[in-house]
Image (cartoon, rainbow, N blue to C red):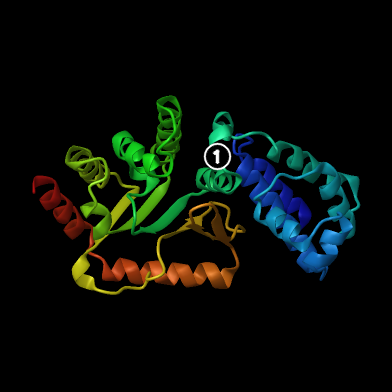
Amino acid sequence: MSVDGAEGKLLSHTPGSPTVLRILLGTQLRRLRTEQGISREDAGYAIRASHAKISRLELGQVSFKQRDVADLLTLYGVTDPAERGPLLALAEQANAPGWWHKYNDLLPGWFEVYIGLEGAASGIRTYENQFVPGLLQTPAYARAVIELAHDKAPGVELDRRVALRTARQRRLEEGLSLWAVIDEAVLRRALGGPDVMREQVGHLLDVTGEHNVTIQVMPFDRGGHAAAGGSFSVLRFPEPDLPDVVYMEQLTSALYLDKPAESEHYARVMDRLSVQAEEPKASRRFLERLRSA
């Protein structure tokens, strides 16, 4: 793809989504670097940084400095002002704060990255073995989950954390496709008490009627399965040039994988999980039985 063609695609995306602009610009910078046969180490040296920072820039995980983008474009042979200008302008747009900026005091940097990716994605496939996926949590269930990690937080802070989680759920109203495989243990674990859990199961039944939400239950009687390593999500983006991103959350950090070999491996695991789990209609019957128990 030519730089001109890439610019057209980059600038066609809404400036209201700085994360997708960072991802798209990072992808273009990675393409320019690899076309020139330049290593991440050499690119990092050109902007007085490490190869790890180049990797984060190319994944769109960090903001861009105008000077860094300018230096990288020079290194990659993009010297025509007509070609450099739009990309430098895009770097400025990509640094605009996202809607979640008002919650920055609550968000660790590694999770802020995920919220941006979630907001830019067109589809998410997720396997959960601990909690109901955040995009499907009721406020009461979300509060019970949040209290596990923030048991000493004042009520006002808990309210804001719940509000942040429910605000993320607007992505489903905007058409985000979500396919969730949920382990039976998640549904048997009565977080917040029986009433909260009954409401949560009822909400899962409600959203299964939406065309963009698919829920499958992985029952205990299936024994071992493909995701023995734990929960993970695979995010896909509307721009075909963007790689899928695999997200795995840990207690105080997260792992992001975007190399094709890695994301393809996890996509195959998700495919196997979808075969091993109850089909969507059977999963709905499972939820109905659970709610009425």
The one of 43 and 275 positioned closer to us in this rendering: 43
Rendered residue at 54%/32% (across/down): 103
Q: Give the amino acid at mark 1.
A: Leu
Taking the image as shown, residue 245 lies to the left or right of residue 12, namely left
In this rendering, the answer to whether 214 lies above or below 207 is: below
Quadrant of residue 172 within the rendered picture: top left
Location of residue 274 in the rendering, given as x and y in whole percent from the top left corner: 31, 66
Judged from this view, the residue extending furthest toward the front is 152
Location of residue 281 in the rendering, given as x and y in whole percent from the top left corner: 19, 57
Taking the image as shown, residue 285 lies to the left or right of residue 180, namely left
Location of residue 285 in the rendering, given as x and y in whole percent from the top left corner: 14, 54
The one of 107 and 118 positioned closer to us in this rendering: 107
Q: Which residue is mark 1?
A: 107
Rendered residue at 75%/58% (across/down): 54
Q: Quarter of the image containing the N terminus?
A: bottom right
Taking the image as shown, residue 92 lies to the left or right of residue 257, namely right
The one of 103 and 122 positioned closer to us in this rendering: 103
Residue 138 appearing in the image: yes
Location of residue 65 in the rendering, given as x and y in whole percent from the top left corner: 79, 43
Taking the image as shown, residue 23 lies to the left or right of residue 91, namely left
| Total residue callouts | 1
